[in-house]
Image (spheres, rainbow, N blue to C red):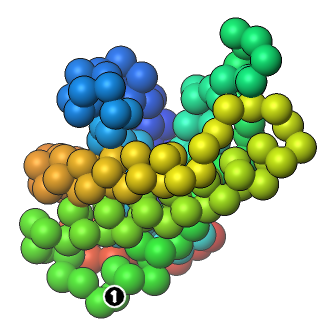
């Protein structure tokens, strides 16, 4: 995989995540698609397993560093490194495991795998945030967060139906073989 192309695409995806994510948001619900998850699904669908896991962890780390959690007693917020990194790495792993079972050239594949990866990330992130909230005073309601993030996973899947074919145009730029899954020699 071309890591420079990945870094540029991740920079663009994080920029879209921070810049225009509030635009397609459904009212004040917080339900909005994730561009970073779609990129990780694309990488995990075509890259070797170790590369996909590394890309998922790096992309999740970027999400961790750009999202804050408000504290209970003040107007401050904290950045917690780990939940999205582990969640998105597990989401990438779920795509790596499932990619042999799906048809890569079908347009619905990106939507389905984006939903699966987003839900895996959601479950892990909500679990880790809930465990962290037991000893750290920040505002986090697991039930409402799980419901909101499930809606966001569905919205991400719908957006992946449109963005997936666009990403396939750049498959050679990322250094993936045009025909199928990434089974190249080497560690990365």
Give the class, few, some or many, for how many residues have Cα within 10 Å of label 1's Cα (few <14, many ≥20): few
Q: Quadrant of the C terminus?
A: bottom right
Q: For the view shown, which residue lies furthest in the top direction?
A: 75
The percent position of residue 41, horizontal first and vertical second, equals 37, 60
Establish if 126 lies above or below 49: above
The percent position of residue 156, horizontal first and vertical second, equals 28, 50
Q: Of helix, strand and loop, which one carries label 1?
A: loop
Relative placement, left or right, of 120 versus 64 is left
Q: Is residue 71 visible?
A: yes
Q: Is residue 56 visible?
A: no
At horizontal 26% and vertical 56% (from top left) the residue drawn is 154
Front one among 8 and 58: 58
At horizontal 24% and vertical 48% (from top left) the residue drawn is 155
State the image quarter where residue 11 is shown.
top left
Front one among 76 and 48: 76
Residue identifier under label 1: 100
The percent position of residue 78, horizontal first and vertical second, equals 74, 24
State the image quarter where residue 115 is shown.
bottom left
Relative placement, left or right, of 7 versus 124 is left
Establish if 38 lies above or below 5: below
Establish if 144 lies above or below 179: above
Front one among 85 and 166: 85
Q: Quadrant of the N terminus?
A: bottom left
At horizontal 67% and vertical 32% (from top left) the residue drawn is 139
The percent position of residue 37, horizontal first and vertical second, equals 40, 50
């Amino acid at each position: 995989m071309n890591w420079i192309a990945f870094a540029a695409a991740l920079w663009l995806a994080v920029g879209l995540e921070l810049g225009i994510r509030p635009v397609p948001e459904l009212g004040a619900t917080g339900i909005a698609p994730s561009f970073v998850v779609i990129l990780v699904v694309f990488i995990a669908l075509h890259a070797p397993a170790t590369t996909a896991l590394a890309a998922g962890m790096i992309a999740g780390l970027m999400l961790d560093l750009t999202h804050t959690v408000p504290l209970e007693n003040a107007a401050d917020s904290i950045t917690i490194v780990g939940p999205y990194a582990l969640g998105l790495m597990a989401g990438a792993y779920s795509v790596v495991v499932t990619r042999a079972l799906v048809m890569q050239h079908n347009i619905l594949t990106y939507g389905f795998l984006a939903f699966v990866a987003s839900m895996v990330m959601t479950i892990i992130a909500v679990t880790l945030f809930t465990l962290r909230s037991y000893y750290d005073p920040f505002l986090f309601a697991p039930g409402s967060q799980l419901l909101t993030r499930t809606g966001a996973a569905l919205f991400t899947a719908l957006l992946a139906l449109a963005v997936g074919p666009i990403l396939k145009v750049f498959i050679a730029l990322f250094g993936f073989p045009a025909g199928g899954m990434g089974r190249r020699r080497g560690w990365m």
